[in-house]
Image (spheres, rainbow, N blue to C red):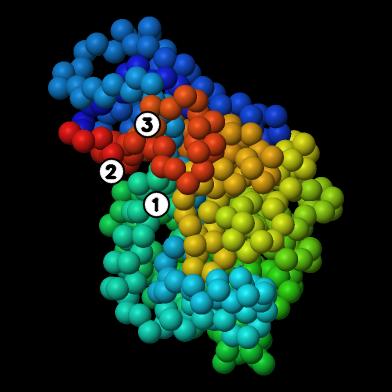
């Protein structure tokens, strides 16, 4: 598909050549929607868009492929800025334990949770891990995800972490999705280091980080800063070490408790702070004036029955906000971004436009790909999705669980379509 014209689009969402790098406060409810629009793609780029009546300007194309989008909306594909999509096994048994009354934290303290996944990952070879992860993320693309950040963190040993990050590197090469890799060795202390936290800190700093840098395996560095996991001091030390290798922080903070992790992450130039189920006024103050993207993970709140992030408080403070899936086998076993918008509307009182901004433009920022993804902008990647014929864009969050996306185009090529040719 060298040249494509999508015509008669009912509404083109997030379209503009002068959009802000992210939307915040009241801007979050602005869809930058062009009604009755066209969109032109050439090779893997967006080259023009506008009202249908202005289409006449581009008439010199030959061999033009035309897609008629009458009654349908076109959006940039979702960017999922926080996932753990490389894993060896699902964890239904922990799901059942939670139904019976155990909490996520109690299961983890018994050796389940992240350590359970780490044990399973050790047993799986790199090729199988890669093949299963590729199939998994391409399944998400059918629901509109065009870019995805993936963390390590189920390795928890030098070989295990390198294996995960090498798998992510192979995914980058094998998939048309935009992929970013984050080193999350500090996801949990492995069993062998239960009584020797300093030993594991040294292992990450002296052995993992240099090897990761040597092979160019990570774009970002993460740390699960939480009670029973890593302290603010340990996170700070790690972020400083990561900075020596130009690894920008994107961190897990404030999932169960408020420990000052947001302030420390902001001070160290974090691109995003993620989870934030717990959030207070000091945290909001720390985020104000920073360029750190607060990121909520409502799939985790839903699945673990923990509080939802206070989206209205963040938006009312004139801050931006991003929504990511947290796709992982323990706390959020779904990477369906459409479903995420439903949960955010129903449980966090976000408007449909707010959720769509929070899963496209703002997550593109939160994964460092704003220059190429997250909006319909001339020169950006031709990563777009076409909805089915729907009454309004609010239908995406409204009809929870349904796949409202009919066609997904990644880098100018149709990746998936429900249309029968
Ligand atoms: N909270 C830390 N890490 C993941 C869960 C990982 C797991 O349970 O396997 C999260 O973001 O929810
Ligand atoms: Zn996570």
Q: What residue do we see at 45% from left, 21% from top?
A: 11
From the viewer's perspective, tell me whether residue 40 is left or right of residue 256: left
Residue 396, given in percent of the width and then of the height, sits at 49, 36
Residue 73 seen by the camera: yes
Other-residue count near label 3 (Cα within 10 Å), few / some / many at <14 / 14–19 / ≥20? some
Other-residue count near label 1 (Cα within 10 Å), few / some / many at <14 / 14–19 / ≥20? some
Q: What residue do we see at 59% from left, 77% from top?
A: 97
Counting residues from the start of the chain, the first of labels 3 and 2 encountered is 3
Which mark lies nearer to you, 1 or 3?
Answer: 3
From the image, tell me which residue sits under label 3.
Answer: 388
Q: Secondary structure at mark 2?
A: strand
Q: Nearer the viewer, residue 52 or 96?
A: 96
Number of labels in the image equals 3
Residue 387: name its quadrant: top left
* Mark 3 to mark 2 CA distance (whole Å): 16 Å
From the viewer's perspective, tell me whether residue 182 is left or right of residue 122: right
Residue 42, given in percent of the width and then of the height, sits at 27, 29
Tag shown at residue 211: none
* Mark 1 to mark 3 CA distance (whole Å): 17 Å
**Mark 1 vs ligand 2: CB under 8 Å?**
no
Q: What residue do we see at 34% from left, 36% from top?
A: 406
Residue 32, given in percent of the width and then of the height, sits at 54, 23
122 versus 263 height, above or below: below
Tag shown at residue 140: 1
From the image, tell me which residue sits under label 2.
Answer: 415
Contact (CB < 8 A) between labels 3 and 2?
no
From the viewer's perspective, tell me whether residue 22 is left or right of residue 73: right
**Mark 3 vs ligand 2: CB under 8 Å?**
no
90 versus 29 height, above or below: below
């Amino acid at each position: 598909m060298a040249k494509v014209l999508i015509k008669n689009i009912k509404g083109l969402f997030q379209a503009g050549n002068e959009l802000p790098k992210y939307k915040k406060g009241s801007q979050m409810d602005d869809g930058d929607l062009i009604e009755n629009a066209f969109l032109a793609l050439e090779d893997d780029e967006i080259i023009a868009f506008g009202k249908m009546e202005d289409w006449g300007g581009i008439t010199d194309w030959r061999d033009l492929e035309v897609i008629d989008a009458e009654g349908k909306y076109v959006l940039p594909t979702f960017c999922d800025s926080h996932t753990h999509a490389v894993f060896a096994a699902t964890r239904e048994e922990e799901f059942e334990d939670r139904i019976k009354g155990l909490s996520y934290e109690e299961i983890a303290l018994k050796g389940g949770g992240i350590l359970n996944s780490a044990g399973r990952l050790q047993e799986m070879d790199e090729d199988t891990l890669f093949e299963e992860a590729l199939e998994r993320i391409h399944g998400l693309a059918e629901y509109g995800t065009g870019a995805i950040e993936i963390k390590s963190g189920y390795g928890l040993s030098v070989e295990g972490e390198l294996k995960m990050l090498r798998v992510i590197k192979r995914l980058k090469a094998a998939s048309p999705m935009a992929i970013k890799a984050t080193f999350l060795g500090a996801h949990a202390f492995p069993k062998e280091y239960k009584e020797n936290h300093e030993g594991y800190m040294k292992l990450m700093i002296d052995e993992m980080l240099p090897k990761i840098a040597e092979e160019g395996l990570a774009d970002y560095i993460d740390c699960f800063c939480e009670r029973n996991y890593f302290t603010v001091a340990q996170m700070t030390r790690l972020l400083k070490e990561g900075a020596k290798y130009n690894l920008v922080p994107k961190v897990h903070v404030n999932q169960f408790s408020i420990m000052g992790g947001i302030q420390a992450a902001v001070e160290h130039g974090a691109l995003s702070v993620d989870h934030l189920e717990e959030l207070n006024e000091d945290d909001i103050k720390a985020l104000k004036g920073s360029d750190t993207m607060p990121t909520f993970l409502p799939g985790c709140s839903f699945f673990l029955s923990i509080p939802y992030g206070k989206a209205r408080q963040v938006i009312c403070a004139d801050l931006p906000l991003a929504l990511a899936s947290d796709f992982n086998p323990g706390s959020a076993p779904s990477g369906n971004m459409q479903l995420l918008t439903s949960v955010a509307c129903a449980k966090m009182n976000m408007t449909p436009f707010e959720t769509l901004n929070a899963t496209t433009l703002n997550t593109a920022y939160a994964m460092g790909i704003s220059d190429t993804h997250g909006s319909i902008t001339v020169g950006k990647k031709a990563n777009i999705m076409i909805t089915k014929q729907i009454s309004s864009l609010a239908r995406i969050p409204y009809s929870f669980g349904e796949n409202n996306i009919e066609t997904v185009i990644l880098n100018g090529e149709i990746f998936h379509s429900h249309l029968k040719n």
